[in-house]
Every structure is written in structure tokens, then in C-alpha cells.
Image: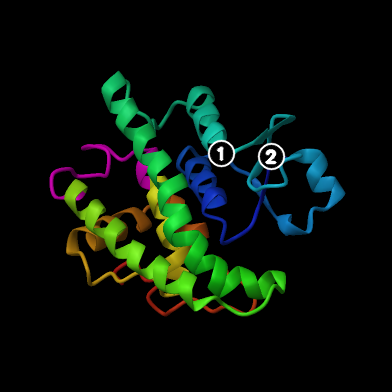
Amino acid sequence: MNRLYHFPLSPFSRKVRLSLAEKRIEVELIEERYWEQDSDFLHRNPAGKVPVLRLSNRMLSESAAICEYLEDTHPNPPLMPRDADARYEVRRLVGWFDDKFYRECTEKLLGERVFRKVKGTGYPDSTNVKAGSRAMRFHLDYMTKLLEHRRWLAGNEMTLADFAAAAQLSCLDYISDVDWNRSEVVKDWYAKIKSRPAFRSLLADQVPGFLPPSHYANLDF
């Protein structure tokens, strides 16, 4: 049985889950409290991070590498374009959301509001929360500029860039930290992507002690 070791509000786990679901690769989801550094989990991934995918007796780690591996081994439906320039743009945006967006928004907002409580490391730092909220406005505006000229983030076809962005935003939407009224085009893009069958399991996630807002699983907001 294929297995994905993940945490429900890990955006990197969610990106891999979306890719797996879009390509119709069935996996068993195993929730992993990776910060506890369990010896069995460290054996699977010495880096001590999720996601980790066991696929056909192979143990795969690092979300970007996993998604590219899935693209190479299960090319249909494609999440990467064939053209070199278009592939570059997808990889650039995946890096943007995995790195810049995560550091400036997700890590500060989700880290303070959820993971401090889950890990038992104290109360939220309001300075980080405010910084994350400010950065979120910048990122939503940047996405707006992209989507005003493109159907999807990297072009006219849905790609891994859209999954990378949606994975981050869906985690923050779970805790009501996305101002969907700031950009109608971003809101429409998100409604379109979360209506895909691949998104269903994410919308069903529940984290004990944290209830999502009523609009979270509503396809029409």
C-alpha cells in the first residue's frame, strides 16, 4: 500500500496530496507529528520533515522532488508544461510559494496561531502575526497581477504552481487568515481550484482544537 506521511496543515504535504490526487494515485494518509522526531520517522527521512511518500517500495522526501518524480513517472495528467520557458515559470512560482510565501506568511501566521499550541511552545507572538498579515497583502497583490493576464498562475493551463500556491493558502484559509475580499481574481482562481476533485480530501481535514470557518469547505465561499 502506498503511504504518505503528512500533517494536515503542512502546506508541503498538501501540495503532494494534490499532485497525487490529480494523477489518481491512491495512498494511505498517515498523520505524523514530525516535530517530535520519532526514531521510526527519522529512519524514513533523516531530515525530520513531512511529507514522506512510500511509493512502490521507494521512500521519497522533499515535496518539490516528490512532485517532479510523480510528473516523470506518472505524466498524465501533466502538471508541468513541455516548453522550457513555461517549465521555468512553473518552477519559479513553485519556489516563490514554497520559500518566500511560506517564510513571510504561512510560517508566521500558521506557526504562531496553530503550531505554538500544538507543539506546546507558548502563546502567539503578535509581532510575527502582524508581519505575516502585512506580507499576505503583498502576495495577494502579486497573484492578482499574474492572474489579470493569465488563466492560471503560470499560464493558460493549470500546473504545479497552482497547487503550490493553493496548498499554502488553504492552510491559512483554515484559520481564516486570507482576506478573499482583497482580490476578486484571486478569489475566483481559488474557487476554481478548490472545486477540483483533487481538493476534496483537503477540505475534509480536521485538526483537533481548531475548527475551520464555515466557508472553508464551501466551493462557492
The answer to whether mark 1 and mark 2 are in CB contact below 8 A is yes
Quarter of the view holding residue 117: bottom right
Residue at 56% in and 77% down: 124
Measured Cα–Cα span from mark 1 to mark 2: 9 Å
Name which quarter of the figure residue 31 lies in: bottom right
> Does the magenta-highlighted stretch encompass residue 71?
no
Q: Quadrant of the C terminus?
A: bottom left
Residue found at the very far left of the displayed protein: 149
**Colour option used:** rainbow
**Residue holding disc 1:** 25
Q: With 81 as the anchor, is 42 left or right in this view?
A: right
Q: Is residue 167 visible?
A: no
* Left or right of 74 on screen, residue 138: left
Residue sitting nearer the eye, 127 or 203: 127
Q: Which residue is mark 2?
A: 2
Q: Secondary structure at mark 2?
A: loop
Instruction: Reply above or below: 204 against 149.
Output: below
The numbered disc on residue 220 is: none
Quick one: label 2, few (<14), some, or many (20+) residues within 10 Å?
some
- Any part of residue 73 in sight: yes
Residue 38 placement (x, y as % from top left): 83, 53
Q: 12 or 103, which lies in front? A: 103
Q: Which residues are magenta?
A: 147-162
